[in-house]
């Protein structure tokens, strides 16, 4: 896994997979949340395959120049949400994709529901919301190209 620290612009670590974890020290979110988000993305896009071993907490912490407690906290959150599982004495492994994908869909649906509620309380009609969502989908699809 290649890792990059945005604060220094230095790529450090060894190749384990095709993914990258980028830590942005200008981001207001805690570092462990950034690590969680990047690992979730890597799991969902298939960069980390089901049942493949996760880097050890110590190795990942060293490669990212982070405190091992930060990585441990991220791993605990990932395990709690079903993205990884731990086998005592063997380490952590990527869970089946379906469980992780279902959790992510529920999370996104909850965020979307909050945004819709907020929009409707602001006087935006259901038709206007549908048009906004269609524009957003179109913009996202263009970004992929």
Image (tube, rainbow, N blue to C red):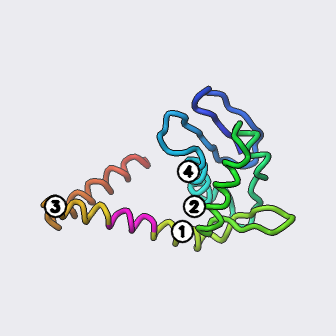
For label 3, the residue is 128
Q: CA distance from mark 2 to mark 3?
A: 31 Å
Give residue 87's quadrant in the image.
bottom right
Residue 75 image position (x, y, % from top left): 67, 58
Looking at this rendering, what residue extends furthest in the front direction?
69
- On the rendered image, what quadrant is the N terminus found in? top right
Q: Classify mark 2: helix, strand or loop.
A: helix
Residue 20 image position (x, y, % from top left): 63, 44
Region in magenta: 107-113
For label 4, the residue is 33
Along the polypeptide, which appears first: circle 1 or circle 4?
Answer: 4
Residue 3 image position (x, y, % from top left): 67, 39
Q: Residue drawn at (56%, 47%), measured in percent from left and top?
A: 34
User: Of 1 and 104, which appears nearest the observer?
Assistant: 104
**Residues at marks 2 and 1 touching, judged by CB atoms closer than 8 Å:** yes
Give residue 84's quadrant in the image.
bottom right
Q: CA distance from mark 1 to mark 4?
A: 18 Å
Report crowding for label 4: few under 14, some 14 to 19, many 20 or more residues within 10 A (C-alpha): some
For label 1, the residue is 101
Along the polypeptide, which appears first: circle 2 or circle 1?
Answer: 2
Q: Residue drawn at (24%, 61%), measured in percent from left and top?
A: 118
Along the polypeptide, which appears first: circle 1 or circle 3?
Answer: 1
């Amino acid at each position: 896994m290649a890792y990059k620290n945005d604060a220094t612009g230095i790529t450090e670590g060894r190749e384990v997979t095709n993914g990258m974890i980028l830590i942005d020290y200008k981001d207001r979110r805690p570092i462990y949340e950034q690590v969680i988000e990047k690992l979730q993305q890597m799991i969902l896009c298939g960069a980390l395959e089901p049942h493949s071993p996760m880097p050890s907490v110590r190795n990942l912490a060293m490669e990212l120049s982070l405190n091992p407690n930060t990585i441990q906290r991220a791993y605990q959150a990932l395990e709690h949400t079903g993205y990884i599982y731990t086998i005592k004495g063997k380490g952590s492994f990527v869970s089946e994709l379906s469980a992780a994908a279902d959790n992510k869909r529920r999370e996104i649906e909850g965020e979307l529901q909050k945004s819709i509620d907020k929009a409707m309380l602001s006087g935006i009609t259901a038709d206007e919301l549908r048009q906004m969502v269609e524009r957003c989908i179109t913009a996202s699809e263009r970004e992929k190209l």
